[in-house]
Amino acid sequence: MKRPWERGADLELFSKVYGLDRGPNFEKDRFVLRESLSRKEVAESLNMTTDALELRLVPLRAKLLAIRDKRPSPRLDDKIVHIIGTA
């Protein structure tokens, strides 16, 4: 996963919140963003309030979304399944 920001405080913060500070958690070499700690726990570990943490995360998530929006969307499974039941 390419990270949309430079190394430093932003990367450290985003990694801590979304588990990127641990090894890959999907298909051996990829990451699925997940919050294993509550925002309160992360904020406390960084000596900040949850509001201050959220204010720092908003622009980082916006950067990530902008990059994700440039990728092709996955195909949709739009098949219709007919179920024939017995009454």
Image (cartoon, grey):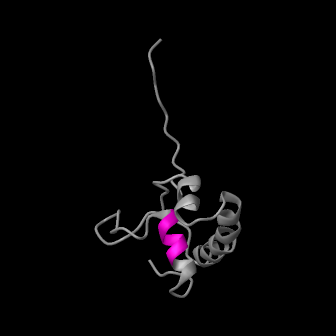
Q: Residue 10: x percent and y percent? A: 57, 79
Left/right placement of residue 57 relative to residue 18 reads right
Left/right placement of residue 73 relative to residue 2 reads right
- In magenta, the rendered stretch is 12-17
Q: Nearer the viewer, residue 39 or 1?
A: 39
User: Which residue is depicted at the point 66% across and 60% down?
Assistant: 49
Please identify the residue farthest to the front as the structure is shown.
47
So how many labels did they put on this image?
Answer: 0
Quadrant of the snapshot with the N terminus: bottom left
Membership of 75 in magenta stretch: no
Membership of 14 in magenta stretch: yes
Q: Residue 52: x percent and y percent? A: 69, 65
Please identify the residue farthest to the top as the structure is shown.
87
Please identify the residue farthest to the left as the structure is shown.
28
**Taken as a whole, is the magenta stretch helix, strand or loop?**
helix
Q: Nearer the viewer, residue 52 or 71?
A: 52
In the rendered image of this protein, does residue 33 appear above or below residue 84? below
Left/right placement of residue 1 relative to residue 60 reads left
User: Which residue is depicted at the point 53% across and 57% down?
Assistant: 76
Q: Residue 16: x percent and y percent? A: 48, 67
User: Which residue is depicted at the point 55% across and 66% down?
Assistant: 46
Q: Residue 40: x percent and y percent? A: 59, 53
Please identify the residue farthest to the bottom as the structure is shown.
6
In the rendered image of this protein, does residue 2 appear above or below residue 36? below
User: Which residue is depicted at the point 64% across and 65% down?
Assistant: 53
Q: Quadrant of residue 60?
A: bottom right
Q: Nearer the viewer, residue 26 or 77?
A: 26
